[in-house]
Image (cartoon, rainbow, N blue to C red):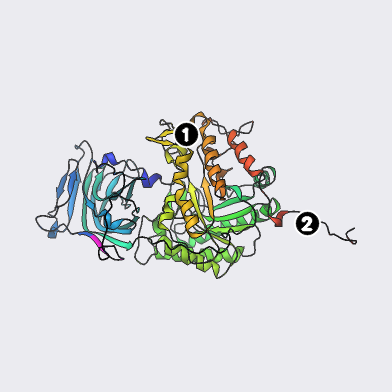
Amino acid sequence: MRIACFLATAVCLMELGALGADAAAPPKVGLSAEALAKVGDVIFAADFSGTDALAGWTRAGNAKIDTSAPGGHAVMIECTPEMPSRGANIQRPLPVERLRGCKLIFSARVKAENVSAKPNPWNGIKFMAPIVAPGGKQWHQGEIGTGTFDWRPVAWQAAVPADATEVSLVLGLEQVTGKVWFEDVKVVVRRPPVVAQPRASEGPPYKGHNLPRLRGAMISPNIDEDGLRTFGRDWNANLIRWQLIHTRGGLPVTTLAEYDAWLENELKKLDAALPLCEKYGLYVVVDIHSPPGGKPTTSGYVGSDDRFFSDKACQDKFIEVWQKMARRYRGAKAVWGYDLANEPVENTFGEGCDDWQALAERAAKAIREIDPERAIIVEPAAWGGPGGLDELQPINVPNVVYSVHMYIPHAFTHQGVFDDGKKQYVYPGTIEGKRWDRAALEAALKPAVDFQKKYGVHIYIGEFSAIRWAPDQSACRYLKDVIDIFESHGWDWSYHAFREWDGWSVEHGSDRASRARAAEPTDREKLLREWFAKNQKPAWSLPAAPPQGKDSK
């Protein structure tokens, strides 16, 4: 979704102190078979006991750090209001050569006393693993509350890129005051590096349809018939991505029983729309935007994270939900595919829970037992970005399509969405110190190209966009380049979004202050409609041909 990578990458490393300069390329270090990481390997553990409890750690910030907790098995970090930075931490490197390509579980017990409110969602108690790779820096971290609380377990997971050059562990406080204690800190291998196993391609990749291309857009689940008529008939789109999304003001979804009630209410909207989609020649992707246990936000329950990866009951409900929907839409002509979960994020972790690879396969197998025909659509973690395909193996069920979302570079596509918009970027141009043009976009999408070629599968771009107020009408230039790339590889695609939030609307002009649709078609609308004009419609939506022969009259 448009919040992709926001919370995951918005942390400012300057607040934590320098972690060292980027390396241009990973060092060429060979490891013996014995040294390669295996499932369950403990990469690092600290109980902070003994006189050398902080050996190997470096200290950043001006704060009190103490290892004299009862029993001597914890480190305490304190920041007071008088300290100008209101932040401090201890940090240490982890053995990056051994961790490349691994998925790791980070766990600890944490206690807090009078930790002040976070000025930003990414501030507060820091239990974090900054990762440096040629493709950019990542800041994975556990989600920990504020205030005062007794010892509680905290666990989360992160994938280390195969080309990572640095991995560090950080414990501390950032932009807050108070005290925090850490004990029993561990880093354990959950999954070793993915070993690519290319599969022999027998014929063309499975697409789930026989049209040259599916081109359309994501839509609001509250769209009316006029909107579907406009999009399907007047604009000639042949695809919509239908969000099952919990928005602010919707039915409560605190419990799994409440989730069932909310989902049934949303499915009734889809049920009513499907005959209209058949009428106007629109294939439908059914997308779970708000899975069981999804993260609560100010706009609703929209994240494929939080309890989704830390509560086994939520994962079991997820399988049950897909079984229910597979039965419901097994014979629906307009349903092209089932998009299992929107932009999964595996930051959280719970005992007995599957990671995304295993959970997606469970869901796909449950669907296939009921519906052997509809395409199953799988996005990678984290956030559905192209790079996530490096950590994904093909799902071991037939008729699967793989989907990524394209909002790279995020600073350009989302400028003014989560900030005050004072930083403005033009495409093509230099964005956050890097030159972005079509060649750079092609490089960003290369993991999808490689995945397609390696495994002989079809790629679907489930979301892509650029905010309409990007300076100098440059949103249109960005959209033109990414669509040209999609088309060059034969990918289906759906723009984000049609008649949803006006920030992404191609029917609205570039003036951010104007919330009304433009009097004349914008350049972005013209661009989409030029591509939609090339669409063919599904056979089931076309008028029946008149009978032939002497009895045809």
- Amino acid under disc 1: Pro
* Secondary element at image label 1: loop
Q: Nearer the viewer, mark 1 or mark 2?
A: 1
In this rendering, position of residue 155 left or right of residue 227: left
Query: Dot 1 corresponds to which residue?
Result: 428
**Is 9 above or below relative to 50?**
above
Q: Quadrant of the C terminus?
A: bottom right
Expressed as whole percent of the image width and height from the top left, the position of residue 43 reads 24, 60
Quote the CA–CA distance across marks 1 and 2: 47 Å
Residue located at (65% from left, 52% from top)? 282
- Amino acid under disc 2: Ala
Instruction: Specify the farthest residue to the left.
Output: 51
Residue located at (28% from left, 52% from top)? 28
Q: Quadrant of residue 305?
A: bottom left
Residue 183 vs residue 231, the one in the foreground = 231
Expressed as whole percent of the image width and height from the top left, the position of residue 152 reads 27, 58
Residue 61 vs residue 337, the one in the foreground = 337
In this rendering, position of residue 543 left or right of residue 515: right
Q: Which residues are magenta?
A: 39-43
Q: Are marks 1 and 2 in contact (CB under 8 Å)?
A: no
Can residue 500 be seen at all in this image of the molecule?
A: no
* Secondary element at image label 2: loop
Upstream in sequence: badge 1 or badge 2: 1
**Is 364 above or below relative to 171?**
below
Residue 128 vs residue 315, the one in the foreground = 128
Query: Dot 2 corresponds to which residue?
Result: 544
Expressed as whole percent of the image width and height from the top left, the position of residue 273 reads 64, 53
In this rendering, position of residue 109 left or right of residue 103: left
Expressed as whole percent of the image width and height from the top left, the position of residue 427 reads 47, 34
